[in-house]
Amino acid sequence: MLTDEFGREVSGVRVSLTDRCNFDCVYCHNEGLGDTRGPMDPQDEEMETDDVVRFLEVAAEFDIEAVKFTGGEPMLRQDLEEIIRRTPDQMEVSLTTNGTFLPGRADDLVDAGLARVNVSQDALDPEDFAAVTKSGAYDKVLEGVDAALEAGLDPVKLNMVVFEHTAGYVPEMVDHVAENDGLQLQLIEYMPELTGRPEWNIDIERVHDWLAEQAADIEHREMHDRRRYWIGEGDSSTDPNAGRGMVEIVDPVENPTFCANCHRVRVTHEGYLKGCLNRNDDLKSMGEMTKPEIRETFREVVESRVPYYGEYMIKNGDGEWELNEKYLEDYAQA
Ligand SMILES: Nc1nc2c(ncn2[C@@H]2O[C@H](COP(=O)(O)OP(=O)(O)OP(=O)(O)O)[C@@H](O)[C@H]2O)c(=O)[nH]1
Ligand SMILES: C[S@@+](CC[C@H](N)C(=O)[O-])C[C@H]1O[C@@H](n2cnc3c(N)ncnc32)[C@H](O)[C@@H]1O
Ligand code: SF4
Ligand code: SF4
């Protein structure tokens, strides 16, 4: 396994398969790539099936244990099942999706080797949902979650971005996962860097405090040092998690040990390797590369990885994030 200069082993890859999407969420960072709006048909610049598989085969040589497929909306790719089927067996395959295309495809994805799915759901009311996603597909998303559960993808994690518009829905979402077996909740701190609306920020520490008051158990996950709160005492002697809800907080901005525990390299839909979600100055194209060339480029990207919050960006005297002078030159080159 490769390790970067900050001692972070790279154990996972996160592959964006497209930047197209059928939603237009008001907060969308599109994995660091900007706007998802535009044509919905497959685009020439997207990696082809073979390109994705070639990269994964190289990643496997570096003992990568897990791959996450994301986007844009990764289920707009009709070859997703094939990509998953051809992913090296050693990798756990997971998917992050808006859920609308899971009905009718969840079983095939599981047959192909999908192990886990996260479905974005920011609200429990169709109108609130539409206000955030600019989509009327609320019922389809619920159907998608059910389809995933029926296909055996239990637990399904619901992803909710916590920002000004949604902060008020957190308690009902927590109740929702506590009351429905098979669901977990992931509360994602809103990241304004890539969307440019800092005024939508909320203080994620208040959410931590509120959850800590009612949690029966609190765990720390190795990846990103994320905290997990178990809500409810559970009501079954056979399954300790029955009747309990798990809520995980993804808080890259405010958790000082989040980036220090980041173990993933990213790939954009155009086939660029990328060491950090928030940086675009370390992109390296895999273009038409052969496997040995991809191997070398992968090493270079790992070498240039820097924890973003706390190292690449540091807080100034006013408590605001600013670029660490050490890295100014990198930005100048971008
Ligand atoms: N800044 C930052 N944000 C991340 C990172 N990983 C996940 N996130 C945020 O969390 C969102 C949802 O992540 P998911 O795609 O569901 O994956 P995940 O929760 O990281 O992975 P699993 O818990 O293993 O399923 C991302 O789109 C980001 O907004 C990361 O490495 N850095
Ligand atoms: C970019 S989407 C791609 C996958 C899929 N389209 C979906 O929505 O699940 C991946 C995740 O990023 C989260 N996300 C998007 N913009 C964000 C932002 N500005 N801050 C934090 N999370 C964000 C979304 O909620 C979603 O869970
Ligand atoms: S569904 Fe995902 S990719 Fe599409 S706009 Fe929403 S967050 Fe972005
Ligand atoms: S270094 Fe931090 S911001 Fe960058 S991808 Fe890793 S956890 Fe995210």
Image (cartoon, rainbow, N blue to C red):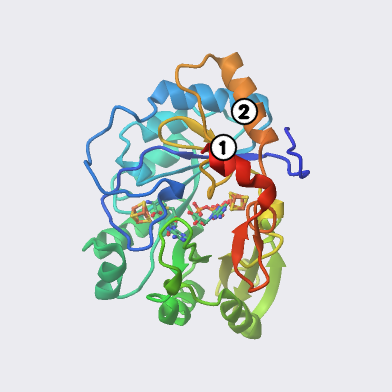
Q: Quadrant of residue 135?
A: bottom left
Residue positioned 70% across, 34% down in the render: 303
Q: Is residue 83 left or right of residue 136?
A: right
For label 1, count other residues whose C-alpha is less than 10 Å away and answer few (under 14), some (14-19) or many (20+): some
Residue 189 position in % (x across, y down): 52, 66
For the N terminus, the image quarter is top right
Q: Which residue is mark 2?
A: 298
Instruction: Give the mark nearest the N terminus, 2 or 1.
Output: 1
Query: Could you tell me which secondary element the residue under label 1 belongs to?
Result: loop
Residue positioned 36% across, 72% down in the render: 123
Mark number, residue 227: none
Mark number, residue 282: 1
For label 2, count other residues whose C-alpha is less than 10 Å away and answer few (under 14), some (14-19) or many (20+): many
Q: Is residue 7 left or right of residue 308?
A: right
Distance (Cα) linking label 2 and label 1: 12 Å
**Three-letter amino acid code of the residue under disc 2:** Phe
Query: Could you tell me which secondary element the residue under label 2 belongs to?
Result: helix
Residue 193 position in % (x across, y down): 48, 58
Residue 273 position in % (x across, y down): 53, 33
Q: Quadrant of residue 248?
A: bottom right
Tell me the mark number nearer the camera, choosing from 2 and 1.
Answer: 1
Residue positioned 38% across, 57% down in the render: 28
> Between 8 and 333, which is closer to the camera in this rendering?
333
